Image (cartoon, rainbow, N blue to C red):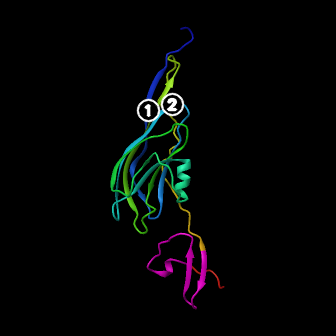
Amino acid sequence: TAGLLPSILNTHKQTIVDATIVVPPMQYVIYPIDPHSSYNSCKIQGIFSARGGSDDIRVYVVDKQGFDAFRRDDKFKAYFSTPQQIGGDIAATVPCDRTIYLVYDNSFSLITGKTVTTKVDFEFEQIFQDPNKLYLDDDIFQPSIPEKPVVDKTAPTVVNLESVDNTHFIVNFDKGIILSIDPSENFEITGEG
């Protein structure tokens, strides 16, 4: 039929991460993936292995709603999740119309950071209607994947400070903290109260 152009299907693979990363204790590292509305059949696939402490890490693939719930410690829906484990495969079919987060979670570990060796790719298809146009990979795929992971560094807040005597205090925080064995490295007293 006149006026109809044949479609061209292009399949692409972009590396999200191919590195050894360090996930500090009680923290997580994220890689946001921002697909384009022209993508189809979006998938996240890869592998990971963890070392340090009990040699385990949690891995999630979530959207923004799931990521926000995860940050609040609420239940969340994941396209992929693992329990605490030493390693394994990552495989998730994800929506192409929203930001997706790959999360390496070590929030359960109070003392030990984890070293995670991982390689994860984002795969998708695009359909083009103009067979006379040359499409280059650089023109087709412009991901919003940071070169370095984002680490959540929200500091704990003091919720209560109580003097026991002239040299001892009880300090309560809104979340767990890890203290140094040397008390002088933990706090600095900046004034008199």
> Which of the 4 quarters of the picture holds residue 120?
top left
Q: Residue at x 43, y 68 (%)?
A: 110
Q: In front: 77, or 135?
A: 77
Q: Residue furthest right?
A: 193
SS at mark 2 in the image: helix
Place of residue 45 in the rendered image (x, y in percent of width and height, measured from the top left): 39, 42
Discs 1, 2 touching: Cβ within 8 Å: yes
Residue 174: give x, y in percent of width and height.
Answer: 57, 70
Mark 1 Cα-neighbour bin, 10 Å: few <14, some 14–19, many ≥20: some
Q: Amino acid at mark 1?
A: His
Residue bearing mark 1: 12
Dividing the picture into quadrants, the one containing residue 168 is bottom right
* 154 is higher (above) or lower (below) than 14: below
User: Label 2: few (<14), some or many (≥20) within 10 Å?
Assistant: some
Residue plotted at (47% across, 48% down): 78
Identity of the residue furthest to the top in this view: 2
**Residue 171's disc number:** none
Which residue ends up furthest to the bottom in the rendered image? 166
Earlier residue among tags 1 and 2: 1
- Residue 21 screen position, x and y as percent: 41, 55
Q: Amino acid at mark 2?
A: Ile
Read off the residue under disc 2.
140
- Residue 56 lies, with reference to residue 127, above or below; the image says below
Against 6, residue 46 (above or below) is below
Q: Secondary structure at mark 1?
A: strand
Q: Which residues are magenta?
A: 159-187
User: What distance separates the C-alpha of mark 1 from that of mark 2?
Assistant: 9 Å
Which residue: 55% across, 37% down?
97
Compared with residue 41, is residue 53 higher up or lower down, i.e. above or below?
A: below
